[in-house]
Image: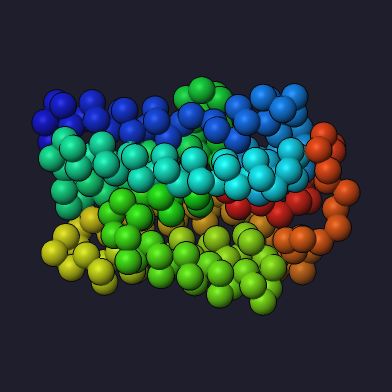
Amino acid sequence: MTGLQALGLLVTYLLGGIPVGLLVGLARGVDVRQVGSGNIGATNVMRGVGPALGLLVFAIDVLKGVAGVMVGRQLGMDGWLLGMAALFVMLGHSFSPYMAFKGGKGVATTLGAGLGLSPVAALIAFGIWFAVVLPTRYVSLASIVGTAALAVLVYVFAPAEPEMAVPVAAMAIIVIGRHSENIERLLKGEESRFGSPRGNGPGAPKNEAQSDEQ
């Protein structure tokens, strides 16, 4: 790893750390940390300020992941080092330096990083996400399954760089770990389903029992 590449990893981390969901909510006069699940991801932004802005946050968080990998490619990274660029941008989102190392759960940014590493693998993982969320309406479960699948799919669809899958596997472990409360609620049958009535319109108060995944 060159000094420039090490600097590039720092850049990807800082890029990933931009709290898009928080900024979008504040622009509408809502601190999304105080509504719904308190998370800054797209799903909670949908609850706090509406679906259109939630989708915007999702798209930008995905693009952050893509951009982080593109920075790595521009600096000549490949193999495990390119995977590290993906990992660092996801770490920035989940442990933002601009939010006292707090942040989202990393699913959308992980998807974007996956698109940068292996578009086919990422699109299949996204398809798996849909295949889980459509019948169950458990976004958290779909996010866990889809992210775990991404690590395997990157290994399968990037055979020339199998070591790239190791940082992606680390990303999946982090995402699953950050869903520990969701997993506990799923096991107890208490997890909220997407679209269920919650009374979480714009400015609704924070409810710790809400499902969240971003």
Q: Can residue 106 be seen in the rendering of this structure?
A: no
Please, is residue 29 above or below residue 182 in the view? Answer: above
Q: Position of residue 31 (x, y in %)?
A: 72, 28
Residue shown at 66%/57% (left/top)?
182
Q: Is residue 136 left or right of residue 177?
A: right
185 sits to left or right of 100: right
* Residue 72 placement (x, y as % from top left): 23, 39
Residue 160 lies in quadrant:
bottom left
On the image, the x and y values in percent for residue 200 come to 83, 46
Q: Quadrant of residue 125?
A: bottom left
Task: Look at the image and tell me in which quarter the N terminus lies.
Answer: top left
| Residue at x 26% of width, y 36% of height | 71
State the image coordinates of residue 81 (x, y, percent, origin top left).
20, 45
Tell me how many marks there are: 0
Q: At 76% from the left edge and 51% from the top edge, which residue is drawn?
A: 210
Colour mode of the rendering: rainbow
Left or right: residue 183 compared with residue 171: right
Q: Is residue 97 left or right of residue 44?
A: left
In the depicted view, which residue is nearer to us: 127 or 158? Answer: 127
* Res 4 seen here: yes
The answer to which quarter of the image holds residue 131 is bottom right
> Closest to the observer: 34 or 47?
47
